[in-house]
Amino acid sequence: MIIQSVGLRNLPETEAFPFNLDLIKNLETIKFSSNVTFLVGENGSGKSTLLEAIAYASRVPTAGGISIEDDPLMEAARSLGNMLSIRYQDRTSAGFFTRAEDFIGFVKNILRNLAEIDTEMQEIKDTWNGGDLNLALKPFLGERKAITDRYSENLDAMSHGEGFLKFFMARITGKGLYLIDEPEAALSPQRQLSLISLILEKVKTVDAQFIIATHSPLIMAIPNANILEIKEGKISPIAYKDTEHYKLTRSFLDNPEVFLREL
Ligand SMILES: Nc1ncnc2c1ncn2[C@@H]1O[C@H](COP(=O)(O)OP(=O)(O)OP(=O)(O)O)[C@@H](O)[C@H]1O
């Protein structure tokens, strides 16, 4: 395990966001007792705010989207992150923070980079007048190969959930801290199961640690995970089958007609 606990060093005397959230005002030290921790709770309960602040405080890089350090919209994550005190068991900056919603932008950036490399190579070819053309193209081909080797041969496919999963498979390799906000946003139920399988393998083989904000009753079913529910401005452990996500999904699937009639 990498992070043992996260606590608030002190609460600044301000009513500015995010310090005005009950979750932050009431925050007690969160102890991580499993390599897989889920943050669950209603929309707006503060999962992303907390996860982003942990990502900033632990200095893991952002995968996809703008880094928390540079993103003007992440001021709150930075100010809360600066107030967090993290206790490490085995510190590393390996790993990443990612939001499924940023993934499409991330893929587009990769595709844009490839298109720029291709355009530059074409321009060189079109205007070439002597010398070794292959030598001139070599650095561009090297850069292109580095990108396609790292992600996928078929980068177009990465705009789908399959690509998101491939991205996880390519980037979740060694021991690291993986902070993921709502992975289910890009994944079908089948691929959510594949993500579970990947997480279980990485916990077992490389001692990777995952902190995941999710609404998915599938993903949060990972055995031996620690589920932390944010409710009424407090964060506390909850058993899988006691979560609203499990109970509501189960009741709904048992009898969707009744639910739909009562809406
Ligand atoms: N920049 C901001 N300024 C003020 N309030 C904000 C800001 N960003 C989020 N909030 C509020 O803070 C609360 C927590 O938001 P957050 O996005 O952390 O919730 P969440 O649990 O991740 O929700 P969801 O499940 O919908 O993603 C919400 O009430 C939200 O409206």
Image (cartoon, rainbow, N blue to C red):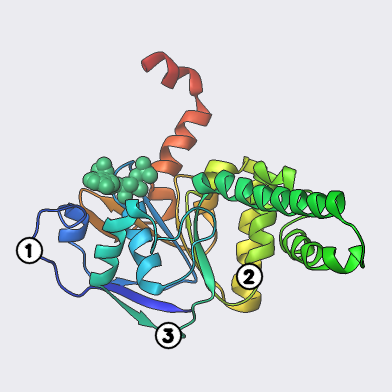
Q: Earlier in the sequence, mark 1 or mark 3?
A: 1
Bin the neighbour count of mark 3 within 10 Å (Cα to Cα): few under 14, some 14-19, many 20 and up: few
Tell me: 58 left or right of 189: left
Q: As drawn, which residue projects farthest toward the front?
A: 129
The C terminus: image quadrant: top left
User: Which residue: 62% across, 65% down?
Assistant: 200
Q: Is residue 129 above or below residue 216?
A: below
Q: Position of residue 27 (x, y in %)?
A: 21, 64
Ligand 1 closer than 8 Å to the CB at disc 2? Answer: no
Q: Taking 204 as reference, is 136 above or below it?
A: above
Using residue 4 as the reference point, say whether residue 44 is left or right of it: left
Task: Please state which of the two labelled residues, at mark 1 or mark 3, is closer to the viewer.
Answer: 1
Label located before the other in sequence (2 or 3): 3
Q: Nearer the viewer, residue 13 or 2?
A: 13
Find residue 89 and name its label. Answer: 3
SS for callout 2: helix
Q: CA distance from mark 2 to mark 3?
A: 18 Å
Q: Which is more foreground, mark 1 or mark 2? A: 1
- Indicate which disc residue 13 carries: 1
